[in-house]
Every structure is written in structure tokens, then in C-alpha cells.
Amino acid sequence: MKRLAYIKTFGCQMNEHDSERMLALLEGCGYGGTQRWEEAHLIVVNTCAVREKPERKAYSILGRLESFKHKNPGLIVGVAGCVAQQEGERLLARFPSLDFALGPGKIYHLPEILREMERGRRGLCEVGFADRPSKDCFLSHAKRLRAYVTIMEGCDNFCSYCIVPYVRGRERSRPGSEILTEIEALVQMGTKEVILLGQNVNSYARSNPHELTFRQLLSKINEIQGLERIRFITSHPKDFTEELIEAFARLERLCEHIHLPFQAGSNAVLERMSRGYTREEYLAKTRKMRDVVPKISITADAMVGFPGEREEDFAQTLDVLREVEYDGLFSFKYSPRRGTRAACWEDDVPPEVKKRRLEFLQEFQRGITLKKNKELEGEVLEVLVEGCSKNSHREMMGRTRCNRIVNFPGGSELVGELVGVQIREGLPNSLRGELCR
Ligand code: SAH
Ligand code: SF4
Ligand code: F3S
């Protein structure tokens, strides 16, 4: 019987992609994937350290797996991701039945670790960063309609609240030629959409004058025959240039969606966060973007309760929401991260105030998102059909270029197709429509 592996993923798309890569590596070691952890022979918890909540959840799962493993001594349990990078050996000490800890820079060591375990070794720890990002080419050859492609790893920005530079290391960019070859190979295997990944994609190859610029890389990808859509995530507002804004108007495969985290609306808070832009600069960029590409969908991340955030500061965050009218927003309560600069400052916004501000912000944004979704009613949008809808087997689900999820009546023969769907209803988190024949 084939051995089964279950991977629980927390955190960003980079972690999701790492989980895909780990699964591909495990397939090479004779494992199959499963969605049911109870039947797995190997469980990996791929952790995120960016905020307290996902970190706490990972610890709670690791705790439960301790007792599960006592009952199933043959089970292999490993921890990966950014908590593994940060805590390493300490995790192994805290959870004695953990078999291995693997940092994000070392996932390609997974087969070796399994071989070591066959020799009876336990408690293996591999952390640290590679000099250059690892190739993605060990991905399995299964068809991926939408495929992640790492273009750079790490971050040099050191926003005062953020753990990422410590757990993902300094910025490293992959050679452009390697990225292009990989995308060509993915397209040959059936990929229609690529999502270029990096903590700050617009600083791609910033320090290497011999490499393509990010804008040039986008142009080259846009020329790949058979590829239909290009997206990238995440962009930093300070590095978001006019040239890049123009790219949205010029490159026909580049989808009309940009994720541009703003974090806070008050200049005093932005300054303490070391974000490197003012609210005015940020707003000027979003305005310019809507001037150049009126239909562009803009999403962002925002935080409430950063040390020293007063009601007036928070009101300015709401003002940004009001002015930009985001198509969608991810919002969080600030939580101090050990080792960051902000963690040395008093976390002086009381929990109940953080909670109130977050709830208010989210309610406010819900109204805007719904309004924006309703504005799409009547329009015919291009949808890349991904599979059956979650709600009904008679319905299909796909994504628009502006990154909305659309459900519409249709059959599975449409999977992988680009179809026109007329939007009938804008809902809080998705759209409903009808196929145009
Ligand atoms: N590289 C991306 C974001 C990475 S982290 C960028 O620069 O935008 C994803 C989001 O988590 C951030 O945008 C921020 O809103 C949030 N975040 C990061 N550290 C946090 C902290 N200590 N507390 C609360 N939210 C945090
Ligand atoms: Fe963190 Fe800032 Fe880097 Fe984003 S840009 S990963 S928020 S340090
Ligand atoms: Fe989390 Fe690590 Fe991504 S801390 S957000 S999984 S880079």
C-alpha cells in the first residue's frame, strides 16, 4: 500500500508553494498526498510566524499530534516553515516526538531526512538560508492550471513589526533565464496562469545590473506562447514605479489586479513602521493606477493597533479605505514578534481597542467590497474555469482577471477554458453569473 502524506499549511502563498514542493519531493520518495490527516503516515505542519494567531494554531496542532503519535508510533511528524526556521532545536525540545524541523530554505533536504530516518535517526533539524533561491523544477509533472513561480526570496525591508526578513533571510533573485525556462515548461504541461512569487517582487534583481529588471522579466513572460495570464505578489508601494503601472496597460497577459499593502493611513504610524512611503505617496500611486487602468482591482493588507496608534491615526486608515475603495482587504491586529524592533516598544493599544478597531475596519470594508462586486453586475468577464464550485456539482468555479471568484452553471468539460461569463449577482465574497454562448 502506498504511504500517504498530509501537509497542513499556514501563512502566505510562499508557504503554500513550499507545501506543493514538499509534496512533489515526497511523491519522489513513494508517498501520495492525502487531505485526511487521520490516514496519513507522514504529517508535516508548515508554519507561519508572521502573527501570533497562525503561530499559536501551529503550536496547538503540534501539541495534539504529540498525543496522536503516542497512539501511532509509526507515524512521522515534521515541522516546516518560518516557525521551524525561527525556533529550530527549541521546537524539537518542546515536542519530543517531533521527528524533524525543516526551515523554508532547506526543504529540498526532505528526501535526505527521510533516508536518515530509515536509518533510525530522529530529531533532525535543518535550518538556514541558501545563497540563491532554490529551483522550482523539482515540481511534479502534474498539470497545474494556475502555477506559482518563485522569482525571488527573502526581504531586505525590515519593516519594524515584521519577522519575515529574519525567517526568510536577505533578498535573493533567481536568474531570469531560469524563470522563463520554467514557465515555458509549465505552459507545455498545461499551465494557463502564472503567479510570480516573492516577498517584494518589484525589487527583483535590484542589485544585479546584469540581470533583467522586473519590468523586462514581465515583458519576456508576456511573450510566452500559450500562457494566458500573469499575476505577481507581493508588491511594496515604495518600489512600485510608473514603469510598472504602465506595464498593466501594455502587457495584455498581465491581469488587472494589484495587491499593494498599505498597512496604515497615518504618516506617523507609517514612519514608525519604517514603510518608506507617506500616505500621500501611496494614494498618488493608487490614483495613477486607476487613471492608467480604470478597471484595475486593488487589494491590500492593513494592520490596526500598532504601538502608539491613536484614534486619529486609525481614522486616517479608514480614510484610505474610503478614498481607494479597495476591491478586497486583508486586515490584522498587530502582534509583537520577538526579535523585531517594534517588539521592544510597549504594545500599548489595549486588546479590546484592537478588537474594536479591527471589527469596525472589516465591517467598513465589507460594505465597499460588496459595492464593488455589485458594480460588476451585467458585465461580461473573462473567467478561467478551475473546477466544480464548492456549493454545487452542477456549477463551475473560476476566476476573473480582476481576481474575483465566479460561480456559474456549467459542466466539467469547461475546466481549463477561458470563457465569457455575464455577471448576474455581486455577493460579499464572490460573483454569480451565466455562461455566454
Ligand atoms: N511582504 C508583504 C507582506 C508579508 S506579511 C508586504 O510587505 O506587504 C503579510 C501581512 O501580515 C503584512 O502585510 C502585514 O499586514 C501583516 N503583518 C506582518 N507582521 C505583522 C505583525 N507583527 N502583526 C500584525 N500583522 C502583521
Ligand atoms: Fe515584512 Fe516589510 Fe518585508 Fe513585507 S516588506 S515582508 S512587511 S519586512
Ligand atoms: Fe508567514 Fe513565513 Fe510567509 S512568516 S507570511 S509563512 S514568509
Image: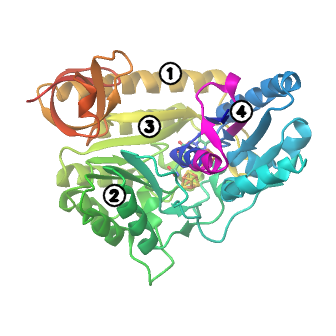
Name the foreground residue: 197 vs 245: 197
**Number of numbered discs visible in the structure rendering:** 4
Expressed as whole percent of the image width and height from the top left, the position of residue 208 reads 49, 80
Please tell me which of labels 2 and 4 falls first in the chain: 4
Q: Is residue 40 magenta?
A: yes
Q: Are marks 3 and 2 in contact (CB under 8 Å)?
A: no
Please tell me which of labels 3 and 2 falls first in the chain: 2
Point 24% across, 31% down: residue: 413
- Three-letter residue code for mark 1: Glu
Please tell me which of labels 1 and 3 falls first in the chain: 3
Q: Are marks 1 and 4 in contact (CB under 8 Å)?
A: no
Q: Which mark is residue 188?
A: 2
| Left or right of residue 35: residue 95 | right
Mark 2 vs mark 4, CA separation in Å: 37 Å
Quadrant housing the C terminus: top left
- Residue 201 visible in rendering: yes
Point 62% across, 24% down: residue: 36
Q: Which mark is residue 317?
A: 3
Observer-side mark, 1 or 4, equals 4
Task: Give the residue at mark 4.
Answer: 58
Mark 3 vs mark 2, CA separation in Å: 45 Å
| Left or right of residue 83: residue 394 | left
Mark 1 nearby-residue class (10 Å; few <14, some 14–19, many ≥20): some
At mark 2, the secondary structure is: helix
- Residue lying farthest to the left in this orientation: 437
- Three-letter residue code for mark 3: Thr
Task: Give the residue at mark 1.
Answer: 359
